Image (spheres, helix red, strand yellow):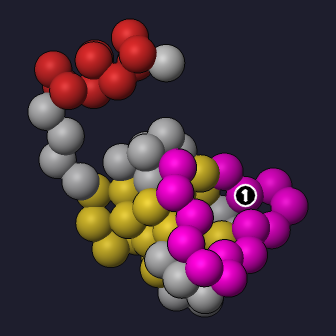
């Protein structure tokens, strides 16, 4: 997950793997894996299309 500048994550919020949260966002619910979310409250604006082969390489590297 990547949190940019001035992000607030409230208690109970869940952020999936490889998600990107935009600046000044407030996360209060669930953000799925591979998602881009922005706003207050944070809203899903995109699910990134990640090649499964690349995802497997990332998992093996960690």
The reply, left or right, for residue 55 in relation to residue 24 is left
Q: Is residue 1 visible?
A: yes
Across and down, in percent, residue 62 comes to 49, 18
Q: Is residue 26 visible?
A: no
Q: Is residue 7 magenta?
A: yes
Query: Which residue occupies 38% across, 11% down?
Result: 60
**Measuring 68% from the left and 82% from the top, which residue is drawn there?**
6
Report if residue 42 lies within the magenta region.
no
> Within the image, what quadrant is residue 28 found in?
bottom right
Instruction: Give percent across and percent down for residue 43.
Output: 47, 76
Q: Residue at x 61, y 87 (%)?
A: 24
Quadrant in which residue 52 is drawn: top left
Location of mark 1 (residue): 13
Q: Report whether 35 appears left or right of 23.
A: left
Residue 6 shown left or right of residue 35 in the figure: right
Q: Residue furthest right?
A: 11
Where does residue 57 sit, x and y in percent of width and height?
27, 17
Which SS does the magenta portion mostly show?
loop
Instruction: Tell me if residue 59 comes above or below residue 20 in the rendering.
Output: above
Residue nearest the observer in this picture, 20 or 61: 61
> For numbered disc 1, what is the local secondary structure?
loop
Q: Residue at x 72, y 58 (%)?
A: 13
Are there few (<14), some (14-19), or many (20+) residues within 10 Å of tag 1?
Answer: few
Specify the segment rendered in magenta. 1-14
């Amino acid at each position: 997950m990547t949190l940019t500048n001035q992000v607030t994550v409230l208690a109970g919020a869940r952020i999936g793997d490889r998600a990107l949260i935009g600046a000044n966002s407030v996360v209060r619910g669930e953000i799925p894996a591979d998602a881009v979310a922005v706003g207050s409250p944070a809203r899903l604006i995109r699910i990134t299309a990640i090649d499964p082969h690349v995802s497997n390489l990332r998992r093996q590297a960690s």
